[in-house]
Image (spheres, grey):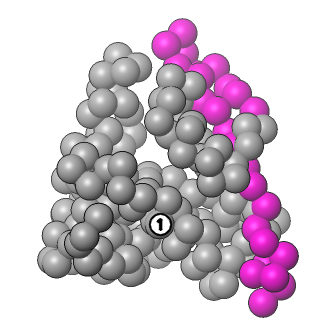
Amino acid sequence: MGMSVTIDRAEERDAEQILKLQYLCYQPEAELYGDYTIEPLTQSLAALRAEVREGCVLVARLGEEVVGSVRGTVDADGTAHIGRLIVHPRMQRHGLGGRLLAAIEERLTAERHAARYRLFTGHRSTGNLRLYRRLGYAPVSTEEVSRQLSLVTMEKEAPRSMAST
C-alpha cells in the first residue's frame, strides 16, 4: 500500500467522518439490492455517537482522515457480532478490510472474551463473501429478508489461545 494507515479505537470526534464514510460505502450495496432505506444509510449521527461511546468501534486512519471502520459487540454466550466493516473505495483491495476485521476480532477476544465471531452480508455481495471466506468464516445460515435480499450469516471460532487469555 505504501501508506501509513493506523487502526485504533474510534473517538466520539470520529463519528461524523465514520457516518459520511458509511454512507459512501453502502451506496453500492443499496444499489445492488434496490433498497436505499437500509439502516447504514439511515443511521443518525446521535445513534453512531452512542455506539462509539458504548461499544467497540475501530477506525483506520490515514493521517487525520478516517478511511475505514468496523464495529462489534459480544453477547452473554461469548458470540462477537461484527458489523459495518467499511473501507473507503480508493483504499479497497489493499488488505485494509482484512486488517480491520483482524483488529476487531483481537480486541473483542482480549477485552470482551469472545469465543466466536459472527457477521452477515447480503447474498449478492460477492466481494464481501469472498473476503469473509478467505479470512476463515463459514456460512451457518441464510435468511430471506425480501425477494431481493437474503442475509448470509457467517461464523468462525476465536483462536483458543486468544479466547483463554
Q: Quadrant of the N terminus?
A: bottom left
Image x and y of residue 45, in percent: 25, 58
Residue furthest left in the image? 64
- Residue 8 percent location from the top left of the image: 38, 80
Q: Nearer the viewer, residue 71 or 3?
A: 3
Residue type at numbered disc 1: Arg
Q: Which residues are magenta?
A: 141-165
Q: Is residue 83 left or right of residue 6?
A: right
Which residue matches tag 1? 99
Along the viewing direction, whichever of 155 and 74 lies nearer the viewer: 155
Reply yes or no: does residue 41 show up in magenta.
no
Which residue sits furthest front? Answer: 2
Q: Is residue 39 visible?
A: yes
Magenta run includes residue 161: yes
Q: Residue at x 36, y 30 (%)?
A: 29
Residue drawn at (82%, 65%) of the image: 77
Q: Is residue 104 above or below residue 44?
A: below
58 left or right of 126 in image: left
- The answer to which quarter of the image holds residue 10 is bottom left
Q: Element type at marker 1?
A: helix
Of the pair 29 and 53, the residue shown nearer to us: 29
What residue is drawn where x is 58% and y is 79%?
107
Q: Position of residue 74 (x, y in %)?
A: 66, 67
Q: Is residue 101 above or below residue 128?
A: below
Residue 59 position, x and y percent, is 35, 70
Please give the name of the residue rendered at 62% of the width and 54% of the height, measured from the top-left corner: 135
